Amino acid sequence: MGSLTPGSVFAGRYEVQRLIGQGGMGAVYEVVHRETRRRVALKVLLPVLVSDADARARFAQEASITAEIESEHIVETFDAGVDRESGCPFIVMELLRGESLGERLAARQRVSANDVVEILRQAGAVLQETHARGIIHRDLKPDNVFLARREDGSCRVKVLDFGIAKVLEQAGLTRNTVNIGTPLYMAPEQLDGSRIGPATDLFALTHIAFELLTGESYWEHEVRTAQSTMALLRAIEGGMPELPHARAHKLGIFVGEPFDAWFLRGTARDPRQRFQDARELVMAFARAVGLP
């Protein structure tokens, strides 16, 4: 199976409208259900991965891992299965209108401190739920946090892509045996293969908050100057060369010692020294930037 073309029908009931986007494992299309005429999002595994048993297992996990969690901050799944004709696994989800944090940042749009708190609060709410069930996302980044528009114009945060999540209670998944993630947001335990846990996701959320507030990742200078991915990883592994307030000041965001203390705790090398739940992290961030 190649790319789906507009006007084609997938799985006998979904009319393809357009390609929304493509990632490392799957492509997402806007489709219309032929019977109900409802517009939904169809995610299919990339053709090159259809025969990969591990990729198929991760893809199937995405459809089921959050099924028992009722939260407006998780994308609702309507259907899932394997297309009989192509043998391609698929997931049908609610169609989101809005933009990801990655798209907003790519447009060089900073986020006000008040809005950062609200985004963190909503994203933190779903992390509270998933962490309580032993589900660790492992790849939180701006591209995986979506600002969906409600009918009244307000934003509802959706945390996307639980396809590589680890379920800690599941046998054989108590260690991070495969380094999956995005280097700018990856905790030390993901880089060295140590045990992961809720603090792993909170490490990433801390870096996301810095980027929203300042408009750039803490590691942007290293990204620009590193000669290779390995060089970037070595720089990150070596630790922060500057206090976060110093890098924020260069970008015109003036924060002080409380912000440094918050960021350094959120990104502590030892997971036990980080915030232990999302609510605590969000409240501490608000205090650090002078908000109630």
Image (cartoon, helix red, strand yellow):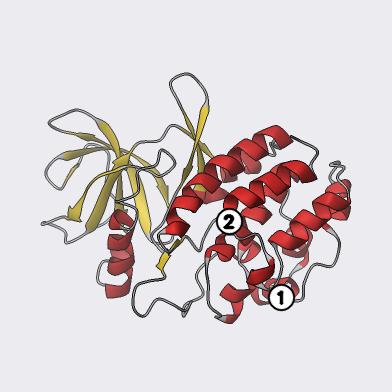
- Residue drawn at point x = 35 percent, y = 36 percent: 95
How far apart marks 2 and 1 lie (CA) works out to: 24 Å
- Label 1 packing within 10 angstroms: few (<14), some (14-19), many (20+): some
Tell me where residue 112 appears, x and y as whole percent: 72, 34
- Relative side of 288 to 209, left or right: right
Quarter containing the N terminus: bottom left
- Residue drawn at point x = 41 percent, y = 70 percent: 168
- Relative side of 256 to 78, left or right: right
Tell me where residue 64 appears, x and y as whole percent: 28, 56
The residue under label 1 is which amino acid type? Glu
- Relative side of 287 to 169, left or right: right
Is tag 2's residue or tag 1's residue first in the polypeptide sequence? 1
Residue 112 visible in the current orientation = no
- Residue drawn at point x = 70 percent, y = 72 percent: 269
Mark 2 lies on a secondary structure that is: loop
Quarter containing the C terminus: top right
Tell me where residue 245 appears, x and y as whole percent: 85, 52
**Residue designated by label 2:** 277
**Residue designated by label 1:** 237
Q: Nearer the viewer, mark 2 or mark 1?
A: 2
